[in-house]
Amino acid sequence: MLSSDFQPTKLYIKPLPAESETKFEFKNMIIGQAVPSNFIPHIEKCFMEAANSGFLIRFPVENIYVVMTDGASHAVVMT
């Protein structure tokens, strides 16, 4: 059985404008299928959860704009 496993993603993070009504925004700017489309919602969810929990600093991070620009994937054999 084959499954897909995503590899590194390239992205940048910048602050949202001060007048923004949202605390988190994610944009997929990948052209083509460098990362399969079924992975994109999961990647966004992971970033949102990390921002809300403050994964590294143990304090929520707000007003960020995450832009995914590239990535890679490869098939993995599942037994």
Image (tube, rainbow, N blue to C red):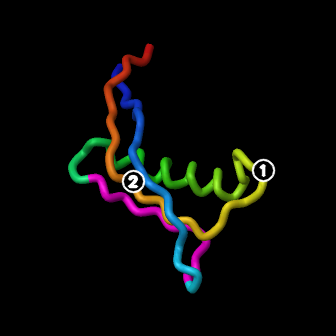
**Residue 36, which numbered label?**
none
Name the outermost residue toward the bottom.
19
Question: Which one is nearer the viewer's eye here, 45 or 62?
Answer: 62
Pinpoint residue 68: horizontal percent, then vertical percent: 39, 53
**Residue 68, which numbered label?**
2
Mark 2–mark 1 contact, CB under 8 Å?
no
Question: Which one is nearer the viewer's eye here, 17 or 25?
Answer: 17
**Residue 58, which numbered label?**
1
Pinpoint residue 19: horizontal percent, then vertical percent: 57, 86
Q: Residues within 10 Å of mark 1 (few under 14, many from 20)?
A: few
Q: Quadrant of the C terminus?
A: top left
Pinpoint residue 72: horizontal percent, then vertical percent: 32, 36
The three-letter amino acid code for the residue at tag 2 is Met
Which quarter of the picture shows residue 34?
Answer: top left
Q: Secondary structure at mark 1?
A: loop
Residue 4 position (above or below residue 13): above
Span of residues in magenta:
20-30
Name the outermost residue toward the top.
79
Name the outermost residue toward the left.
32
Is 40 inside the magenta-drawn segment? no
The three-letter amino acid code for the residue at tag 1 is Arg
The residue under the point 56% across, 52% down is: 47
Is 29 inside the magenta-drawn segment? yes
Q: Secondary structure at mark 2?
A: strand
The residue under the point 69% across, 58% down is: 52
Pinpoint residue 71: horizontal percent, then vertical percent: 34, 41
Q: Quadrant of the N terminus?
A: top left
The residue under the point 64% across, 51% down is: 50
